[in-house]
Image (cartoon, rainbow, N blue to C red):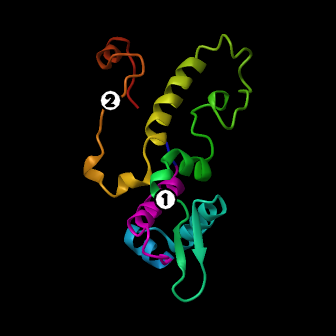
Amino acid sequence: MISKKAKYAIKALKVLTEEFGKGPVLISYISAKENIPKKFLEAILLELRNHGILQSQKGKGGGYLLRIDPARVNLAQVLRVIDGPIAPTPCVSLNFYVKCDDCDDEVTCALKPIMERVRDANLGVYENTSLLAFQNLESLETKEISIGMPASAGSDVGLMSA
């Protein structure tokens, strides 16, 4: 699950994508348009600026704007800046690997291969969704991604839905 902070970051980037090429956008405009608390938004935009996704301009006519073309920024990059690891467990993280403290042997761990599949499914969506997706929401397709188990198989094995 992504944090509220990440959700606000994505909403702010949606506005900045819509305004791309038109100059800086005021924090107050983004805050009002997306119903994001202004102080919280300031911290989020600063973090995105510090990681090179945004740039800011001070003074009259100032504000924030995308530093990079929206086609070159994907959701995985944004989520890593705001929330850190995308992986569901630290032992399967591609960029923030940490051995699980409760695992004796990663090679024989029954959970690790499942968590790798969860990570890969999420990354498949996040890495292939650029900020440009916000300009044409109708073009986004919702499709099931196969991760090794047919959809009907889940009902036969007693899985609980989350």
**Residue 82 falls left or right of residue 128:** right
Q: CA distance from mark 1 to mark 2?
A: 29 Å
What segment is highlighted magenta in the picture? 3-26
| Residue found 29% across the figure and 16% down from its top | 152
Q: Which residue is mark 2?
A: 144
The answer to whether residue 104 is above or below residue 86 is above
Q: Which residue is mark 1?
A: 69
Q: Position of residue 32 (x, y in %)?
A: 41, 74
**Nearer to the camera, 35 or 158:** 35
Residue 115 quadrant = top right
- Residue occupying the far left of the picture: 138
Amino acid at circle 1: Asp
Residue 19 is covered by the magenta coloring: yes
Residue 8 is covered by the magenta coloring: yes
- The label nearer to you, 1 versus 2, is 1
The answer to whether residue 74 is above or below residue 34 is above
